[in-house]
Protein backbone atom coordinates (compact mmCIF):
# COMPACT_ATOMS: atom_id res chain seq x y z
CA UNK A 1 0.00 0.00 0.00
CA UNK A 2 1.36 3.38 -1.03
CA UNK A 3 1.77 5.98 1.72
CA UNK A 4 -0.10 9.16 1.02
CA UNK A 5 0.67 12.45 2.72
CA UNK A 6 -2.00 15.11 2.53
CA UNK A 7 -2.42 18.57 3.97
CA UNK A 8 -5.75 19.88 5.18
CA UNK A 9 -6.14 23.63 5.77
CA UNK A 10 -8.85 24.82 8.16
CA UNK A 11 -10.41 27.82 6.36
CA UNK A 12 -11.39 29.80 9.47
CA UNK A 13 -8.02 29.55 11.24
CA UNK A 14 -5.64 28.63 8.40
CA UNK A 15 -4.49 25.78 10.63
CA UNK A 16 -2.69 23.09 8.63
CA UNK A 17 -3.13 19.42 9.49
CA UNK A 18 -0.80 16.92 7.85
CA UNK A 19 -2.27 13.47 7.26
CA UNK A 20 0.25 10.64 6.97
CA UNK A 21 -2.06 7.65 6.71
CA UNK A 22 -5.67 6.66 6.18
CA UNK A 23 -6.29 6.06 9.90
CA UNK A 24 -5.54 9.70 10.66
CA UNK A 25 -7.82 10.71 7.81
CA UNK A 26 -10.70 8.63 9.21
CA UNK A 27 -10.19 10.20 12.65
CA UNK A 28 -10.27 13.67 11.12
CA UNK A 29 -13.54 12.94 9.31
CA UNK A 30 -15.08 11.47 12.47
CA UNK A 31 -14.19 14.66 14.33
CA UNK A 32 -15.61 16.75 11.50
CA UNK A 33 -18.90 14.82 11.55
CA UNK A 34 -19.20 15.42 15.31
CA UNK A 35 -18.60 19.15 14.84
CA UNK A 36 -21.23 19.36 12.10
CA UNK A 37 -23.80 17.55 14.27
CA UNK A 38 -23.10 19.91 17.19
CA UNK A 39 -23.48 22.95 14.95
CA UNK A 40 -26.78 21.72 13.55
CA UNK A 41 -28.13 21.21 17.08
CA UNK A 42 -27.13 24.74 18.16
Image (cartoon, grey):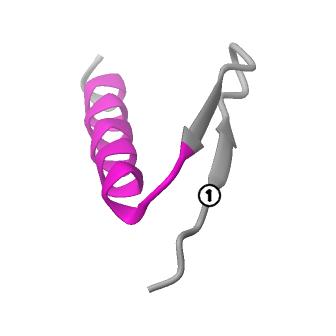
Q: Residue at x 59, y 40 (%)?
A: 18
Quarter that holds the N terminus: bottom left
Quarter that holds the C terminus: top left
27 is higher (above) or lower (below) than 2: above
Q: Residue at x 32, y 56 (%)?
A: 26
Q: Residue at x 58, y 67 (%)?
A: 4
Percent x, y for residue 31?
31, 37
Residue 20 located left or right of residue 26: right
Q: Which residues are magenta?
A: 19-39
Q: Main secondary structure of the magenta part?
A: helix
Q: Quadrant of residue 36?
A: top left
Q: Residue at x 39, y 64 (%)?
A: 22
Q: Quadrant of residue 12?
A: top right
Percent x, y for residue 25?
41, 54
3 is higher (above) or lower (below) than 8: below
Residue 37 located left or right of residue 15: left
Q: Which residue is nearer to you in this view: 31 or 36?
A: 31
Q: Residues within 10 Å of mark 1 (few under 14, many from 20)?
A: few
Q: Which residue is nearer to you in this view: 11 or 38?
A: 11
Q: Which residue is mark 1?
A: 5
Q: Is residue 32 magenta?
A: yes
Q: Is residue 21 magenta?
A: yes
Amino acid sequence: MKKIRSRVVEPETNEITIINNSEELHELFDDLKKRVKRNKNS
